[in-house]
Amino acid sequence: MPPSRHPEIPLPQRRPPDRSRGEKSGFHPVRSKLIFIVNLILGVAILAYVVRMYGGDALAILSANPNPVYGLGVVIAAAATVLMLSWRWGFVMGGWNSPIGLLRLSLYRSAAHTLAVLVPSGKLGGDPLRAWLAARSGISGGRAIGGVAVDRTLEMGSSAPFSVLFAVILLQQGVPQLEHALVTVLIGTCALGVGVFVAVRRLRQGHGLVTSLLRSRPLRRLAAGSSGMGVAEEADEATADLVGRPRRMAIAFGAGLIANLLVIAEFAMLLWAFGLPSEMTAIAAAIFATGAAHMLPIPAGVGVLEGAQVWIFGMLGYPMEVGLAVGLAVRLRELLWMAPGVVFMLVSGVRTSIGLIGKD
């Protein structure tokens, strides 16, 4: 059989649990599916309730006087944000002379975002897909993993200051319930900083991160008898190479800050497009509630996204229907972000199927 044109990320082979020794499997697909379905039903129930209570008035607000110019601005800002995030990812991998163009990186990123939104994972669920797609495009598995890991860390770091800023703005406007959220964000930011410092120090001292994890007793079997450890070692080497390039990391971090500013502009134009409250407090509320909704284990944030907007705008003194109108407008933005990824995955799936049929 001829070798594949694209390097694959080898997956560690897992030894089946030995029931005679009392071993238990750590993964329960039936339980995971049940949790997914229950959370989805809960989200749909929340959405049905808020739509039943305030849906008519919210739709009337959205359809009253939409501005197509600002609507086009939302599309342009969204595209600019995705391109900036994709450029940063490519720039991080640029030390390896990445063969992936910006447009393809953008499609990969959109596909990963779609998966991360649909599968509750705190937006991390799409990262394995990004690494896999990068490997399919000519980057070795370890380097693809290292590039995605560094890019995700940079994204979390560049977003943290804005999360703190939005929480402070909302607290100043009389939303005392967010005091605990601010403390949580501050603790998370500090923990991220400490984690990055420790990780960089270990890498500079020649100690691996992924390899150390796989050598731990609970995960040792995952790498046994496979090339999984080799990929992990390559990922550690690639990550260490990146953290040894401070100028490149600083530029990539700056690109993340620009992307966050573009998101603010995107939300501002989204609110302007439908004549919704658009002062800085309202923009901060819409962004903060959107981020919080996607941290909950509800597929696509169904119901939770809309409910969060109703709650936070209600705390700011706006009628409930205004909050729901903001939630529905943000849902349109979510669909806009997901559309290229959905098309890409559908087309890629069709092409893969055709290729397999042709081989048969």
Image (cartoon, grey):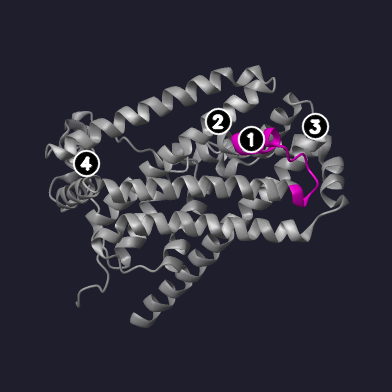
Kindly identify the amino acid type of the residue bearing the numbered disc 1: Ala
Mark sitting earlier along the chain (3/4): 4
Q: Residue at point 85% right, 52% down?
A: 63
* Left or right of 15 in this view: 27: right
Q: Is residue 116 above or below residue 280?
A: below
Indicate which disc residue 320 carries.
Answer: 3
- Answer yes or no: is residue 10 visible: no
Please name the residue that numbered disc 1 is placed on: 284
**Structural distance between the alpha carbons of marks 2 and 1:** 8 Å
Kindly identify the amino acid type of the residue bearing the numbered disc 4: Val
Please name the residue that numbered disc 2 is placed on: 165
The residue carrying pointer 2 sits among few (fewer than 14), some (14 to 19) or many (20 or more) residues within 10 Å by Cα, namely some
The residue carrying pointer 4 sits among few (fewer than 14), some (14 to 19) or many (20 or more) residues within 10 Å by Cα, namely some
Mark sitting earlier along the chain (2/3): 2
Kindly identify the amino acid type of the residue bearing the numbered disc 2: Leu
Kindly identify the amino acid type of the residue bearing the numbered disc 3: Met
Q: Which of 211 and 31 is in front in this view?
A: 211
Indicate which disc residue 210 carries.
Answer: 4
Q: Is mark 4 on a helix, strand or loop?
A: helix
The residue carrying pointer 1 sits among few (fewer than 14), some (14 to 19) or many (20 or more) residues within 10 Å by Cα, namely many
**Structural distance between the alpha carbons of marks 3 and 4:** 47 Å
Percent across and percent down for residue 249 are 32, 47
**Structural distance between the alpha carbons of marks 2 and 3:** 25 Å
Task: Give the position of the N terminus as an image quadrant.
Answer: bottom left
The answer to the question of whether label 2 and label 1 lie on touching residues, with beta carbons closer than 8 A, is yes
Percent across and percent down for residue 345 are 48, 64
